Each structure stands twice: as structure tokens, then as C-alpha cells.
Amino acid sequence: MGNCHTVGPNEAMVVSGGCCGSGAKKYVIGGWAWAWCLVSDVQTLSLEVMTLNPKCESVETSHGVPLTVTGVAQIKVMTEPELLATACEQFLGRSVREIEEIVLQTLEGHLRAILGTLTVEAIYQDREQFAQLVREVAAPDVGRMGLEIVSFTIKDVFDVVDYLSSLGKAQTAVVKRDADIGVAEANRDAGIREAECEKTMMDTKYDADTKIADSQRQFEMLKAGYEAEVNTKKAEAELAYELQAAKVRQMIRREEIEIDVVERRKLIDIEEKEINRKERELIATVRRPAEAESFRLETLAAGDRTKTVLSAKADAESIKKVGGAEAVSIEAIGKAEAERMRMKAAAYKQYGDAAMMSLVLEALPKIAAEVSAPLAKTDEIVLLGDDRTTSEVSRLVSSLPPAVAALTGTDLSKLLTKIPGAK
């Protein structure tokens, strides 16, 4: 009978022994193995990293200066089959603490040996080189034990005779001197650099101000251009809006006109129908009765006309006869009047101007009567005015002879000069 044994990846299991006195060994890392009861032995070895702190106190260097050095080392068991077998041969059955103690003494021995070959300055100034040297010297011995040095670093170096502090003072003085020189040079360079920077800053500032002014000018120009363009677009938009509004109003007005036209057409149709209705009504109520009345009146008028014609013919015959008698009478009267006028003309011709004067004198009363007829109804006439009133009266009196001459054809002034005693 036997058991199944397992280990994790941080351990190595060694199974030795077996049936029939077998001397084979089996190494298992992170797995399992079968072991027979009573005839097989199962042991484990940790593969975890071991951290060691080697320390060498008051170890004299090559110049005889005692130093104390501490370091940190990381050690682990190698897993290659041959090296793992070596480590198992040397450390199997030991605890981790015992393994650490063995390796620590090995590292401290090599560390002491190397310290004796170096100077304090080499150890202090180049610790990495010192640690590398320790790893190189100790690695073969540690490797022969199936172990490897994962890392080794120097943690601290100090002494009790103030050698390092003295060395540090001298170095500090040199460093301070160099620092003072560096500070002075730095101040000088800083002043020069500051002036150069100041000049560069001013140049940059002036250049930046110039660029800002130029950019501002370009911005203002572009802004003015953009504003002009925006204003133009706004004006175009407003004009377009007004134009569109005018078009819409025109369309609305056109529609309203069309609506009015349609309404008027409807009204005209209605009125035409109403006119037709009234016309038919008038024909029925007025025209037809009027035509009937007209026919009646025409019939009556025809009868009256026939009666009148017959009566007129009778009257005309009577008038014809009466007119014939009157014509004979008028002819006789005209002949008598003509004879009278002929005789009067002969008398006028015989008596000349005296006859004309007689005619004028006969006509003057008639003219005076006609002229004074409008004044017959006037009770009183008052003439107001200055000398122009007299001149108006004189002008009125002087216009009388031309009026008489126009009515009778006789010059009244010439006739009056022929009357004795007249002026």
C-alpha cells in the first residue's frame, strides 16, 4: 500500500527508496508522486527566496581603516535537476533558518575578503561596483551548494574613527568652494542671462505688441468687412422680406379682386335675372296692357283721324273760300297802302329835310316814352358824386344823336343846325 503526496510550486518534493531496494530518487515541483508505505521516504525543500542581511563590523580596508558594511542578499534554490539534486544533498532535512545561516556565513566571509582589498574611497564612492564584485566572488561557492544569488546590494557603510566624516569634510570644503565659485559664476551668468532675457523679453514684448496691434487692425478690418457683409445681407434679407411681403399682398389683393369679380359676376347674374324677371313682369303688367291700350287708342285715333280729315277737308274748303276773299281784300289794302307810301315818298322827296325833320320830331316822343318807361315807376332820383357825374350826364346826352341816327338813319345834329335859333 502507499499514499499519493502533493506539493505546491514553491516546494520541491524528493521521493527516495522503493521496492526491491531501488536507489532511484524522484524530484517533483508543484505536482504529485506516489510513495509506498514503509519502503519510500518523502521529504520537501522550500524553493522560496531567502532574504539575508550580511554584516561585517570593523573590517580593515587596504589602507587599514576599519569599516562596518551591511548588505542585503536574495538567495533561492535553483530548480535545474542537477543543481536541485545538489541542494537536496546538502540541505534536505534542514530548516530554512539553518540554510540561511550557512549561506550568510559564506557571504560574510567573501565580503570580508573583498573589503580587505579595496580602499575606503572605492567602497564609499562606488557601492554598485563593490556589490557586483561580491556577487561575482561568492556566486561560484553558493552555486556549488545548489543556490543562486538573485540580488546583492550594499545597504550601509560607516566607521567609528570618523574617516568618512573627515573625507567628507574635505570633500565638502571642495564642494563648498566649487559651489561658491559656481554660485558666483551662476550669478554672473544669471545677470548676463537676465539682461539678455530682459532684452529678449522687451524685443518679444514689442514684437508681440506690434503683432497684437497688427492683428487688432486686421481684426477691425475683417470685423468691419464682416459687419458690412452682414449689413448687406440684412438689407438684402429685409428687401427680400419686403418684396416677398409685397408679392404676398399683391397675391392677396389679386385674390380679393378675383373674389370681388366673382361676387360682381354673381351680382350681375342676379341683377340680369332680376332685370329679366322685371322685364317679363313689365311686359306682363305694363307692355301688354299698354299695347292693348295703344291698339285701342290707335283704333280710336284712326276713327278720329278719319273724322278729322273729313272735317278738315270741309274746313279747308271753307277757309279756302274765306282766304280768297281776304286775299282780295288784303290786295286792295296793300295797293292802297303802297299808293299812300308812294305819295308820301314823293312828298318827302319834294320837301327834303323838312319832311325828315317832321318824321324825327314825330318819333322823338315815342323814343322818349320808351326811354322814360323804366323811370316812370321811380319816385326820386338822387345823383351823388363829383365832377364825374356831370361828365356822365353829358356823355349820356351826347350819345342820343347817334342813337337816333341808328334808329332813323337821320343825323339829328345836322338837322338841328338848320333850325333857325338852334345851336
Image (spheres, rainbow, N blue to C red):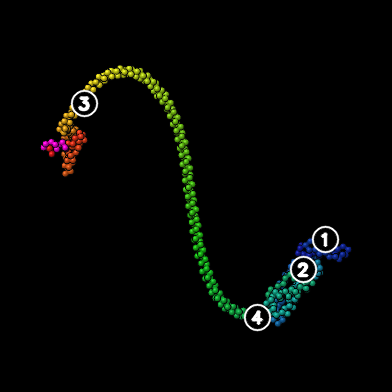
**What is the C-alpha distance between the residues marked 1 and 4?**
65 Å
Q: CA distance from mark 4 to mark 3?
A: 193 Å
Q: Which residue is mark 4?
A: 167
- Quadrant of the image containing the N terminus: bottom right
Q: Residue at x 72, y 78 (%)?
A: 115
Whole-Å distance between the Cαs marked 4 and 2? 41 Å
| Residue receiving disc 1 | 34
Q: Residues within 10 Å of mark 1 (few under 14, many from 20)?
A: some
Assess disc 4: are there few (<14), some (14-19) or many (≥20) residues with their C-alpha within 10 Å of its C-alpha: few
The percent coordinates of residue 118 (x first, y second) are 71, 79
Q: Residues within 10 Å of mark 3 (few under 14, many from 20)?
A: few
Three-letter code, disc 1: Trp
266 shown above or below 238: above
Q: Nearer the viewer, residue 255 or 293?
A: 293
Give the alpha-carbon distance from disc 1 to disc 2, as whole Å.
Answer: 24 Å
Q: Earlier in the sequence, mark 3 or mark 1?
A: 1
With 116 as the anchor, is 382 left or right in this view? left
Q: Secondary structure at mark 2?
A: strand
Which mark, by number, is residue 250? Answer: none
Label 2: how many residues lie within 10 Å, few (<14), some (14-19) or many (20+)?
Answer: many
Question: Which callout, 1 or 2, points to the residue nearer the camera?
Answer: 2
Label 2, on which residue? 77
